Image: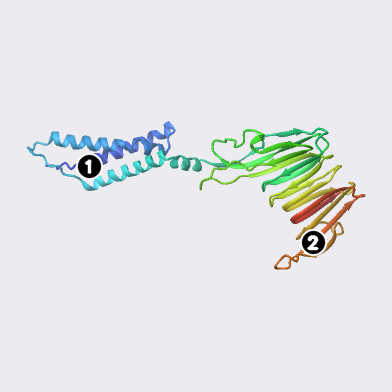
Amino acid sequence: MRTWRVGTFSMGASLVFLGLFLFFSRFLGLNLIQVMTSWWPLLLVVLGIEILLYLVLSRQEKPLLKYDFLSIFFVGLIGTVGIAFAVLSSTGIMGKVEEVMAREERSFELPAFSNPIDDSIKRVVVRTVGYDMTIEATEEKEVSMFGTYRVQTTNKKKLLKSANDMVAATKKGDTLYLNVKTLPNEISPFDSNGTVAATILIPNHVLLEVIGNNSSLTLKPRSLENDWNIESVSSIVVDVAKSSNLKVGAVGVEEVSGKDGDWKMSVQENADDVENQVQKNAVYQAGEGKYHINIANAYHVSLNTNQ
């Protein structure tokens, strides 16, 4: 005569239910996390029904429950895993893990930004935040910015909704202040900062001041008709046409590069530096050098000259 041990039927039923859930999840679009957080309560129901059936069907006057401890351990293990998934899901951790697993790196266009420049604005101050930037002079009477950014995202979702998410423009007196913002980033171990490659167009007739944040910067002055002052960048590339009327001066930089004979070099020693580090001053002039690009507190300055 066979002996019925409580837990044997529950283990078999749990395997059947789990197999069915996983099978139909392929057609219903469910993932493993959704299955494990939704089906595990059935284990308790099946185990309770098995105990009741044993008590009802047992012909003993005082039925004694006999357990299949190996099967119950297996059922309990699956149930514990399901409870753990449910707890993590309720705290939001599981949702964050799902989001990270579904992410992919994608590039998007920056929302277009433009700010008209009238005759009352004589100076533009740009403050960057560490992204690679290109600043170019233009004959248009507006400050504009465009480019791309690359982030990790889910469902091809754009991170920036409008230009205000990336740049803030404030006019004070005769000066327009342009502050570039960092990409939104949640403070958690699952998120990482994105990258930005942007171009800022500056009217060629206004005075420009750029305050960097140890970032890389490319300057394209083209037909410049005023001075540019650049400071606190790690590396800077200046594209200059030999036919322009421009003078580029770099003060206190560590590395200077360009075609032989372009730069006029001088060397200075920094007395405040413990290592007595040698820094360079470099000057390049095209034409009469009427308009100036002044560079300070930069590590590397590179000059590209063209016809």
Residue at 27% x, 37% y: name it.
44
Which residue does the numbered mark 1 point to in the structure image? 8
Label 2, label 1: how far apart the Cα atoms are: 83 Å
Residue at 22% x, 47% y: name it.
69
Q: Residues within 10 Å of mark 1 (few under 14, many from 20)?
A: some
Q: Is residue 97 left or right of residue 248?
A: left
Disc 1 on helix, strand or loop?
helix
Which residue does the numbered mark 2 point to in the structure image? 280
Residue at 50% x, 43% y: name it.
100
Work out whether 37 lies above or below 285.
above
Question: Image quadrant of residue 27?
Answer: top left
Task: Provide residue 35's location: percent of width, then percent of height.
Answer: 38, 37
Disc 2 on helix, strand or loop?
strand
Please identify the residue farthest to the right as the structure is shown.
288
Amino acid, disc 1: Thr
Question: Image quadrant of residue 42?
Answer: top left
Amino acid, disc 2: Lys
- Please report whichever mark, 2 or 1, sits nearer to the chain's N-terminal start: 1
Residue at 80% x, 55% y: name it.
250
Work out whether 118 lies above or below 4.
above
Task: Provide residue 183's location: percent of width, then percent of height.
Answer: 62, 42
